[in-house]
Amino acid sequence: MTITPEKIGSYRWRILALLFMATTINYIDRSILGVLGPTLRDKVFGWTVQDYANITISFQVAYAIGLLSMGGIIDKLGTKKGYTLSIVIWSIFAMLHAAVTRGMGWIGFAVARFGLGIGEAGNFPSAIKTIAEWFPRKERAFASGIFNAGTNVGAIIAPLFIPLIVSSDGTHWQYAFLVTAVFSVTWIILWNINYQKPELHPKVSSSELQYILSDPPEPVIPKIPWIKLFPVKETWAFAAAKTADAVWWFYLFWGGFFLNARFGLELKGLALPLIIIYLIADIGSVFGGYLSGIFINRGWTVNKARKMTLLICALLVLPVTMAPIVANQWVAVLLIALAAAAHQAWSANVFTLVSDVFPKQAVASVVGIGGMWGAASGIIANLALGKVLTDAGPHGYVYAFLVAGCVYLVALGVVQLIMPKMTPVQI
């Protein structure tokens, strides 16, 4: 008799809840400076636009380096220790923002952001490796979509709580960087109390363990140094798919600027549009993972299910190319929201590609390598967009959204070219 998910136990969903919580904390810490940036620039530190750009790029560079290095560290230490190390690092540097003084200039914040980027880079490799350990293939995209939804929840929470503790003139700005430490400490305690590999966990029932391990067994192999993964073509198929991360960085860093330039929205006017964008993006994150699971349950191969879902996501992004030329701000907001939702659905399935074809011992390293490429793409795109907007003014957004709308189809084509059958990798 076939075992159904309703009868097999649910401890894996408790582990998933911890991944969602960590990802939410990750994006709260990441988003604080974006919310406080104008206040800190104009009323506390007197940064120039270039100073703020340098601070932002410092985080992106560290994030790219961290994704490359943290993935290998997590595969070496294991998920429990590796994830703990990651959140300890980013929490320490998040709090260190509060110690920056005016005399330190933008360099003080750049150093804090650099450390934050190194630590935060461990979140996604850790989470994807955990998904690979705790979920069978047919549930992994859905599970990835749920924890990835924490990115949007964190981006929503930050602008909601910061005005409650920081005055409009910047008084008590330090508290914004300190309060999340309480969440981080709580998470570390819960993680270390609740996490073990499912094979060793006393609270996992035999039926749930059987379900988790229901995929064909993987060969037992030693831990894989990440340097050995660079020549593997499937590593670069994943990296190609992660090129679309540059579009997500564009929405995070430039979405508010676009709405201001195109429709004249100021700080208060931006709040509701941004919340709508991230709420709809949350729906896309969960639904995208669910959709490929539906296809697999209907008998589709994993290869067909994942790539058909990615194609649907890529097609749903295309209408965003119209955002800079529509006359109504809410139409533009909804177009961006649809694209953001499609991106999150895309991400949920792209992350799952790694655990679909690589052995569990290599998952975090491959996620780190691909994520590094995605972060590097974001840095290049950020620099290019700055030049385009300088030369062309607000009209430059037309070119930016055109590229943003087309990247996904190009990336999917490269993935199909490199990895047409998603055959498990033998290393």
Image (cartoon, rainbow, N blue to C red):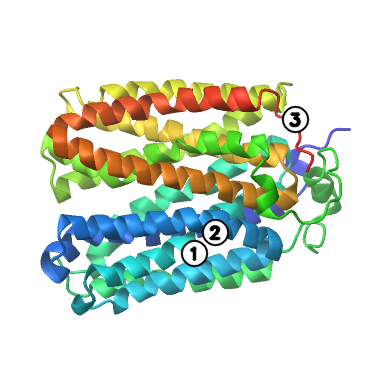
Residue in front for this viewpoint, 168 or 58 = 58
Left or right, 47 with reference to 413: left
Left or right, 236 with reference to 210: left
Residue at numbered disc 2: 122
Q: Earlier in the sequence, mark 1 or mark 3?
A: 1
What is the C-alpha distance between the residues marked 1 and 3?
Answer: 32 Å
Where residue 26 sits in the image (x, y, percent)? 45, 59
- Is residue 232 in view from this perspective? yes
Which label number is shown at residue 221? none
| 265 over 338 or under it: above or below | below
* Residue depicted at x 73% and y 49%: 360
Dot 3 lies on which element?
loop
Residue at numbered disc 3: 423
Q: What residue type is labelled 1?
A: Gly
The reply to whether discs 1 and 2 touch (Cβ–Cβ < 8 Å) is yes
Q: What residue type is labelled 2?
A: Gly
Left or right, 276 with reference to 44: right
* Residue depicted at x 42% and y 23%: 316
What is the C-alpha distance between the residues marked 1 and 2?
Answer: 6 Å
Residue at numbered disc 1: 119
Residue at the right extreme, as displayed: 1
Q: Which of marks 3 and 2 is nearer the N terminus?
A: 2
- Is residue 17 in view from this perspective? no
Q: What residue type is labelled 3?
A: Thr
Q: On the rendered image, what quadrant is the C terminus found in? A: top right
Residue in front for this viewpoint, 415 or 347 = 415
Q: On the rendered image, what quadrant is the N terminus found in? A: top right
